[in-house]
Image (cartoon, helix red, strand yellow):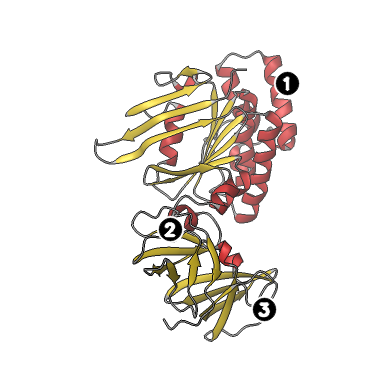
Amino acid sequence: MSDGQVTLKHVTKSFDGSQFAVQDASVTIEQGEFFVLVGPSGCGKSTMLRMIAGLEELTAGEIHMHGRLSNDLSPSKRELSMVFQNYALYPHLTVEENILFGLKVRKVSKQEQRRRCDEAVDMLGMREYLKRKPRELSGGQRQRVALARAVVSQMPICLMDEPLSNLDAKLRAQMRTEIRQLQQELGITMIYVTHDQVEAMTMADRMMVLRQGEVQQVGRPLDLYNHPANDFVASFIGAPPMNLTTATVDNSGTLHVPGAPRPLVMDQPLPAEQEVQLGIRPEHLHLEPQEDSDWELPVHLQTVEVLGNETLLTMDAGGADWKAKIPGQWSLEAKRQAVLYLNSSHLHLFALDNGKNIGASLSAPVQEEVTL
C-alpha cells in the first residue's frame, strides 16, 4: 500500500478568474490522520476535496500524494476511495454487488473479492443485508454500504464529502463513532468535509477551518477551541459559539466593557484609544461566584432553557447578545436582571479591523469603582 500522505502547496481554484473558491491553501496531511475540512456553506471545502480527488482542476498550486506530484493524475490513478453525500449506490444492484462493483471493474479475483467483502460486512454489521436492494435500506444502512465499498477498495486515502448530512441527529452521532473507529482500525488517511463543527471537533485529529475560500486556521480541535486565530474561528467553533462584544482601551491601556462596573487592566497594554472585540466562552460564565472569579458583569436575562444536564441562558450583556451554559437545572425567571461571574484569564481579545487574536493576557481587574 502506498504512503497516504497528502500535501497541498498554495492550492488555488478560481472559476471566473476573479472570484476564488479556494485561495492559496497549504497543508500537509499525514499518513493515517483523520483530517477534517470545516466551514460554512460556500467556503470552498468541497471544492478542495474535489481537487484532491482529481475531479476539479487546479487554477494554481500543487497537490502531492504518495510522495509524488499528482496535479495531472486522473482520479483512478490517485489511489483513493470516496464516500459521497448521496451515497451514490446503484439502485438495480444488491448490497453485495454495490460493495464489489469497484473490485470487479479492477478485475480483482473472485476469491479476493469474497475475502474483502466478508471483512467489510462483518466490520460494519451488514451481512444480513447483502441480498437487499438500496431501496430496502434505511439511510444509515445505505451509508454503511457506501463505507463498505470504500473499505474493500483498500486504498490508503479515503475522501468523505458530508456523508452524514442526510441522517437524523441520533444516527449521525452513532455513525460519527463508527467512521472514526473504522478509520483507526484500517489506519488509512481520511479527509472529511463537514459544515458541522460538532462533527469536526469529535472526529478530527486535526482540522482546517475555511471561510470564503481562505484558510483561517489549521490545528488540533482543542487548540482551535482554546486558542482561536481570529474572531471567525472563535465564533464558528463551539456550541453555543463564543460570546463577543466591543470594548474600548483608554490611554492607560485599561479595558472598558459596556455595562461592567469595573474595567480590566492588561499585563501587556494595547495601543491607547482603540476599540477591540472581547470574547468569552458560554461555559466560563457563572451565576454564582467561583473560587477563581475575579470579575462580574450585570446582564438582563432574556430566555432560560433548562435542558436537563445544563441550563442555557440568553441575555443582553451591555447591548450584545450573549449566551451562558450553566451546569445543572436552574429555575430562573426570564426578563430580569442578573449578575454573571467569570475569571478574566478566560477572556480573549480580537482586533476590531481584521479580527485577529491579539493574544494580550488579562490580569486582575482594577479595584476602584468606575462609572461607565
- 236 displayed left or right of 97: left
Circle 1/circle 2 CB separation < 8 Å: no
- Image coords of residue 193 (percent x, y): 51, 41
Q: Residue at x 35, y 33 (%)?
A: 12
In the displayed orientation, state which residue is furthest to the front. 252
Dot 2, how many residues are within 10 Å of its Cα: few (below 14), some (14-19), or many (20+)?
A: many
Total labels: the figure holds 3
Quarter of the image for residue 372 reads bottom left
> Element under label 1?
helix
Q: Residue at x 59, y 23 (%)?
A: 155
- 293 displayed left or right of 46: right
Q: Which residue is mark 3?
A: 330
Q: Which residue is mark 1?
A: 115
- 335 displayed left or right of 186: left
Tell me the kind of residue under disc 2.
Phe
Tell me the kind of residue under disc 1.
Arg
> Element under label 3?
loop
Q: Indicate which label's residue lies in the foreground, 1 or 2.
A: 2
- The numbered mark, 1 or 2, whose residue comes first in the sequence reads 1
Quarter of the image for residue 103 reads top right
Q: Residue at x 50, y 21 (%)?
A: 78
- Image coords of residue 151 (percent x, y): 64, 28
- Image coords of residue 370 (percent x, y): 46, 81
- 16 displayed left or right of 268: left
- The numbered mark, 3 or 2, whose residue comes first in the sequence reads 3
- Image coords of residue 112 (percent x, y): 69, 16
